[in-house]
Amino acid sequence: MQSTAQDYLAVISNGCGIGSWARGPDKADTIANVTRRYYYDWRKLIKGGLDGKDAIVNVIDVTGHDAVSWDSQGFWGNGGSRIDRPIEQVKHTYPEKKRRR
């Protein structure tokens, strides 16, 4: 019997073909995971940091696809087939950090 658990992929792109991603069975947890990863991956590499800035998280249901890739044209599953499912965009705002005196 196959599992009916959902499988979500969340991606934040820098617009240069790079960024961060997370995958998991719970959509909210997957979004939280990718926003944390993106912050720790990129906070020191992006001019001005990420504090107080917005990030757009692209979330797609990838249930049934073992291998997933993506590019500017969309998300691709097993065997290079396009995953023709809705892509949800979630806006995440990183909190402002208190400045030390």
Image: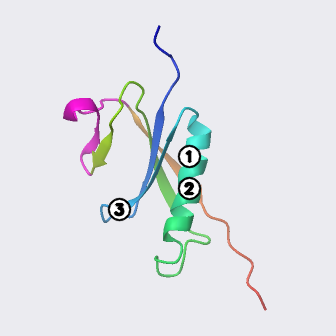
Mark 2: which amino acid? Thr
Mark 1 nearby-residue class (10 Å; few <14, some 14–19, many ≥20): many
- Closer to the camera, 100 or 63? 63
In this view of the protein, can residue 24 be seen by the observer?
Answer: yes
Give the left or right position of residue 79, taking residue 67 as reference.
left
Q: Is residue 77 magenta?
A: yes
The residue range painted magenta reads 72-85
Q: Mark 2 or mark 3, which is nearer the start of the sequence?
A: 3
Position of residue 35 relative to residue 46, above or below, is above
Q: Residue furthest right?
A: 101
Return the disc, 1 or 3, that comes first in the chain's sequence.
Answer: 3
Q: Is residue 69 left or right of residue 27?
A: left
Query: Mark 2 touching mark 1, by CB under 8 A?
Result: yes
Pointer 2: what residue? 35
- Residue flagged by tag 3: what amino acid is it? Ile
Residue at horizontal 53 percent and vertical 72 percent from the top: 43
Amino acid under disc 1:
Ile
Q: Is mark 1 on a helix, strand or loop?
A: helix
**Residue that badge 1 annotates:** 31
Q: Relative to 73, is 22 on the left or the right?
A: right
